[in-house]
Amino acid sequence: MKNLLLLSVILFVSGYTSCAQKSEIYLPREYRKALKNNTRDLTGAPGEKYFQNRADYQIDAAFDPQTRILTGNETITYLNNSPDSLKIIVLNIDHDIFKAGTNRVYEVDAADLNDGVEVTGVKINGETIAQAPPLWQRDGTEVIVRLQKPLAPKATLKMELSWNLIHPLKTQMRTGTYDSLSFFIAFWYPRIAVYDDVFGWDYTQHLGSGEFYNDFGNFDVSMTLPGDYLMWSTGELQNGSELLTPQIMARLEKARETAETVTIASFDELRKDRVLKPGKTKKWHYKAGNVTDFAFGISPVYQWDQQYATLPDGRRV
């Protein structure tokens, strides 16, 4: 009886091992296609023909803290590095999560519901695009833009947009109003969605949860604010000497040379108008290279401390 039981166990283990050796890891058909096209390998790493498209943004905008209205103009330079001719562009207008009727995971305060981002103008390669089907189809936080001429591989497209939005007053969802004078502003500009080697266009709506999937690109952003406001953002300030007093600029230079935390501007100095040069409004100019997004904070009452960190590759941020 013991010998029969032992034989049964041996046969079971042998059969299980044989089945295990013949089985394959399940792969979605999209990933099988990427393997066939040699854009990925079985580990998920880039293959020989892997590609990433690129979007560079030049934005000139203004924000009014009294009305919480942000207006902007942007030019997106989009490079198609894929082997495919693109017949459409998928545009994300993530701030439409505050539009009444839009699907979302988190509740938005009733005071912050509105008619969504108002897009006041669209051009593609210099030609005005009507915001109506069949060329323009808006759904949730996405727009499908049908191109009159496909964007060929290795070709570049220029998209120009003008828009305005109302920043939320009570809802804080990665973006919001944090006191009557201070704001953190994120997903505020229209951006082109990712076209990748596995799924093609990313049609994921912004629902308020989850992180963003963006292409890398360069950002050149100018933001006009009231003259007593400071702005901190992605990237590096380009025109500090036009905005800040010599004493503040000297502290910024000092901060670049040390690993210690340096107080650039104290609350008391802000209160006594010793930080910013005189002026009713100021245009802050930032540049950020090869990043995936751009966000910023503004306030006339926050103390400004700064510290640099050295990354493993030697860059200081």
Image: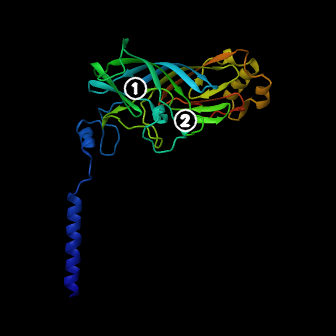
Tell me which residue sits at (72%, 20%) in the image.
Answer: 276
Q: Nearer the viewer, residue 170 or 279?
A: 170
Single out the residue that lies furthest toward the top: 126
Q: Which residue is mark 1?
A: 54
Dot 1 and dot 2 residues touching (CB under 8 Å): no
Query: Left or right: where does residue 4 sit relative to residue 278?
Result: left
Residue 52 at x, y = what percent? 36, 30
Amino acid at circle 1:
Arg
Decide: is 220 above or below 216.
above
Report x, y in % for residue 85: 26, 24
Residue 174 in view (yes/no): no
Residue visible at 33% across and 45% down in the picture: 43
Residue 162 image offset from top left, x and y in percent? 47, 18
Q: Secondary structure at mark 1?
A: strand
Front residue of 29/13: it is: 29
Residue 267 % position (x, y): 76, 31
Q: Is residue 101 left or right of residue 66?
A: left
Circle 2 Cα neighbour tier, 10 Å, few/some/many (<14 / 14–19 / ≥20): some
* Image quarter of the N terminus: bottom left
Residue ID at (59%, 24%): 236
Residue at 30 percent of width and 27 percent of height:
82
Q: Quadrant of the C terminus?
A: top right
First in residue order: circle 1 vs circle 2? 1
Q: Callout 1: 10 Å neighbours few (<14), some, many (20+)?
A: many
Residue with the mark numbered 2: 112
Q: Nearer the viewer, mark 1 or mark 2?
A: 2
Task: Pick the residue in front: 189 or 105.
Answer: 105
Residue 165 seen: yes
